[in-house]
Image (tube, rainbow, N blue to C red):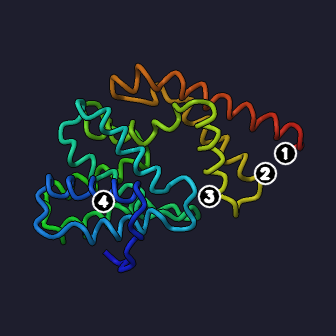
Amino acid sequence: MDSDTPQRRNDPLQEDLRDAWRRTAEAAGADRDPAPYADRLLAAWAEPQRRYHSTAHLAAVLAHIDVLAGHAGDVTTVRLAAWFHDAVYRPDRSENEERSAVLAERALAELGVDPARTAEVARLVRLTVTHDPAPGDADGEVLCDADLAVLAGTPRAYAAYAAAVREEYGFVPDEAFRAGRAAVLRQLLALPRLFRTPHGAAHWEAPARANLAAEAAELERVSDQTGA
């Protein structure tokens, strides 16, 4: 990995994530000390341009994977993919997932993780471009559902998520952002299913659709008021 800047210690969330990384790397068969990789990954996740795609998002995705773990075929691989799925993130670029997958391939090879598992992690990271796992792709379903679970938060939590996304795209003018965001919401609402795991379908689908529809309606209201 490229960064040599260690993340500051004594933040409880950071320490919990380091412990989680160590356990996952060891379960994956790493034969090198995983600690420096935790520092570099956490430094990446804490970059200043991130408002939503932050260490808090990483922790939330890992927590949702814990909820969905029984559906996974190889939950260790899914957890590794969560660590890397937004490890490279620039809101003004479109190749973040590909660059994150390449980073996973390089870092996991250095750690001594089995090549087949490394390739599967990279595949899962690339899957987060579309969040559209093929039927029977249990690990893909778990990662994608965990990543999208934020959509099913309480109205207040969802509003905080939407505001953080807007902050990440602060360089985009309001009118252009509203148009682009509305297109994303329409695309999500048009999907036959947002969530593929049984838990996601039962517990997250309905609140997520309600949140998406409410945000879409608010964007339309503001656009009507401004004539945009």
Q: Residue at x 68, y 34 (%)?
A: 215
Q: CA distance from mark 2 to mark 3?
A: 16 Å
Q: How far is disc 3 from disc 4 in space, using C-alphas?
A: 25 Å
Give the labeled residue for mark 3: 168
Nearer to us: label 2 or label 4: 4
Identify the residue position indicated by label 1 in the image.
Answer: 228
Q: Position of residue 220 (x, y in %)?
A: 77, 35
**Who is closer to the viewer here, 104 or 155?**
155
4 and 1 marks in contact (CB < 8 Å): no
Choose mark 3 or mark 4, whichever is in front: 4
Q: Residue 208 location in percent, x, y?
A: 54, 29
Q: CA distance from mark 4 to mark 1?
A: 46 Å
* Residue 127 screen position, x and y as percent: 36, 48
Which residue type carries mark 4?
Arg
**Any mark on residue 120, and which?**
none
- Circle nearer the N terminus (2, 4): 4
- Of mark 2 and mark 3, the one earlier in the sequence is 3
State how far apart marks 2 and 1 are (Cα): 6 Å
Residue position marked by numbered label 4 in the rendering: 18
Q: Check disc 2: other Cα within 10 Å, few if <14, some if 14-19, many if 20+.
A: some
The amino acid type of the residue labelled 2 equals Glu
Kind of residue indicated by mark 3: Glu
Residues marked 2 and 1 touching at CB (< 8 Å):
yes
Q: Secondary structure at mark 1?
A: loop
Q: Earlier in the sequence, mark 2 or mark 1?
A: 2
The label nearer to you, 4 versus 1, is 4
